[in-house]
Image (tube, rainbow, N blue to C red):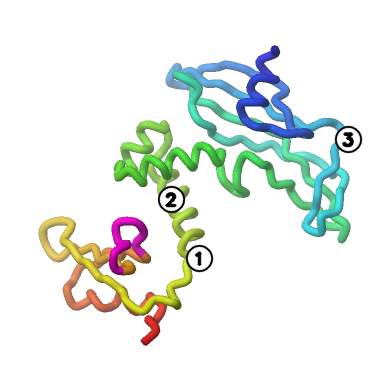
Amino acid sequence: MKSETLFSMALGLQPPWQVKEVTFSKDELARSELHLHIDFVTGSRFLDDANNLCPVHDTVERQWQHLSFFEHTCYLHCAVPRITTTDGKVRTVDVPWARPGSGFTLLFEALALALIEREMPVNRVAEILKVNPQRIWTIFNHWISKARAADDPSMLTKLGVDETSTKKGHHYVREHAKPGEAAKQPFSVFHHSPPESRDTSLETFVPIRR
């Protein structure tokens, strides 16, 4: 079995997507890298928002960092197709291995969140995954915002509030959660400094039904 076929299977790629080329290299710090070049079958058509199959207009080069392969930092590369939709617009096709606008694969982001969920500091997560900490915060903020948007606290009849100091001086963290579920899923966590600002965190919270 060719390495391209094996990596296509490992990535869970389905037609028309396929790994076309596998290359190895070194970065400027002499660290090993694995590059998987993904392509699509010539003549493929892709669905637009109206679920109509549309022809490829052109392609745009994209790169995503993937989970490391042993000591090799792994990157996926693809000339992502842009299609001409049925209403005449040109748009980029969404790829199945990454969310739009991200420089990481979904599996990479899932691992980053899994490490954070186990109470690992973001800086340590970034060190393990070999990226800048701010990029881990970007992943974290995206998925937390998505989760909060999906929450519906309007049915709450009770709200538990807990507060603790984070360092010397007036630095506090306040957590809002449904009683009995704080450890599982707090609704919100706020950082504030002066004691008189304690109640301001509630101003951004959806009013509780009485």
Numbered disc in front, either 2 or 1: 1
Q: Which residue is mark 3?
A: 43
Mark with earlier residue (2, 1): 2
Q: CA distance from mark 2 to mark 3?
A: 38 Å
Q: Quadrant of residue 31?
A: top left
The residue sitting at 62% across, 39% down in the picture is 97
* Residue density around tag 3, few if under 14, some if 14–19, many if 20 or more, within 10 Å: few
Q: In the rendering, at what x and y percent does residue 54 appear?
A: 86, 48
Mark with earlier residue (2, 3): 3
Q: Which residue is mark 2?
A: 140
For the residues bearing labels 3 and 1, Cβ distance under 8 angstroms: no
Query: Residue pushed farthest left?
Result: 168
The residue sitting at 60% across, 48% down in the picture is 101
Q: Quadrant of residue 4?
A: top right
Q: CA distance from mark 2 to mark 1?
A: 14 Å
* Amino acid type assigned to the residue bearing label 3 in the image: Gly
Mark with earlier residue (3, 1): 3
Q: Quadrant of the N terminus?
A: top right
Report the magenta residues as a range: 179-186
